Image (cartoon, rainbow, N blue to C red):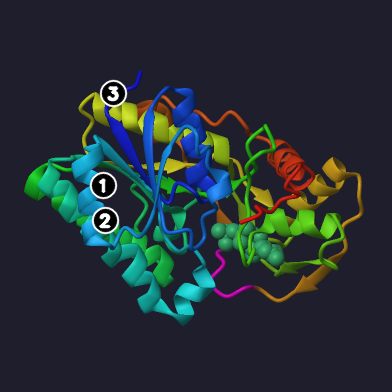
Amino acid sequence: MSQGTLLITGGAGYIGSHTVRHLLEQNERVVVLDNLVFGHRAALPLDRVTFIEGDMADAALVEKLFAEHKPEAVLHFAAFAYVGESVANPLKYYRNNLAAPLTLLETMQRHGCKRFILSSTCASYGDPVRIPIDESHPQAPVNPYGASKWMLERVLRDCDTAWGLKSVFLRYFNASGSHPSGEIGEDHNPETHLIPLVLQAAAGQREHITIFGTDYPTPDGTCIRDYIHVCDLASAHALALKFLREGGDTIAVNLGTGRGFSVKEVIATAEAVTGRKIPVVFGPRRAGDPSELVADPSRAMEILRWQAAHLEPREHIDSAWRWMNGAQRGHYAD
Ligand code: UDP
């Protein structure tokens, strides 16, 4: 049921645009704020959303937006998310992922907007000390990207104490897949994620996929990850919003399936889905990659009544392959 207007920062990005679609299907009223640095205008149904091109750090713009649209809640996707780049250029990440949202939060406080849903990350846990990872697992991020999200969680808790801001920190595991329509999908530049890179290799758009490390302490020697379908992430946001509307308190919630798959398993599944042999090169480990990241998603089930609908990597890869072979061939025109 639709209530007030929702502000979606970064709504033209990968996870943001899938969530916008889902919220529109639920008859929500949506305003998207996106500077289009990584987002794509074409990822938005412009006839059904109010789109404002601009930056969340632009205090005058954000003030005008709040005065005009009076958002009831903010779903905050806008962030930089390249782990390697964050190590090389930490200030860029602290500026965009930590400092810029402060302007947004100050404006929310002035306008009495007290609901916030944060795109957080399993990278805020750092190297796992136990698997599966539940929300009480220590947070000891090992790179500035994870640290910027972890610090923002802290800021939001302090805002709760000070002025009653209620937040849900959605700690995503490995987002993957595309909308079943094939109309929107993952289009990062540069692309660093495993599944799109594997499919690009399958499509002949790149020569091979390099497996980063084959000597991990896992059954086949390659890293294990918990791949969560982007449409499942989208539905979790709607349920987090419902939770806050019903008076829910600030809480962190993992979003994963609870099932881990190795890099080799992902590649084998992609070969089965595409019917193509994927050229593989064995490379060294990538710095900062833990051997295994798998969520304990029970809190999301208990508190949000959320359950991942797409448990098999085959479904993720199949939808991503459809996006790559759809009208836009895996890339937006803008
Ligand atoms: N990976 C890989 N080759 C690539 C890209 C990724 O072997 O070209 C591995 C990476 O080491 C990790 C897994 O695939 O174990 C998922 O990586 P991705 O970058 O998709 O997500 P991350 O786990 O870093 O969030």
Read off the residue under disc 1: 65
In this view, the residue farthest toward the left is 162
Mark 3 belongs to which amino acid?
Gln
Mark 1 belongs to which amino acid?
Leu
Read off the residue under disc 3: 3
Mark 2: is the Cβ under 8 angstroms from ligand 1?
Answer: no
Residue that appears at 43% across and 53% down: 121
- Residue 114, label in figure: none
In primary-sequence order, the first of circles 3 and 1 is: 3
- Residue 61, label in figure: 2
Give percent across and percent down for residue 229.
Answer: 59, 40
Answer whether residue 163 is visible to the viewer in this image: yes
Residue 152 lies, with reference to residue 248, above or below; the image says: below
Element assignment for label 2: helix
Q: Give neighbour class at mark 1: few <14, some 14-19, many 20+ (Cα, 10 Å).
A: some
Residue that appears at 37% across and 52% down: 137
Frontmost of labels 3 and 1 is 1
Which residues, given as a range, are shown in magenta? Answer: 286-291
Q: Are marks 3 and 1 in contact (CB under 8 Å)?
A: no
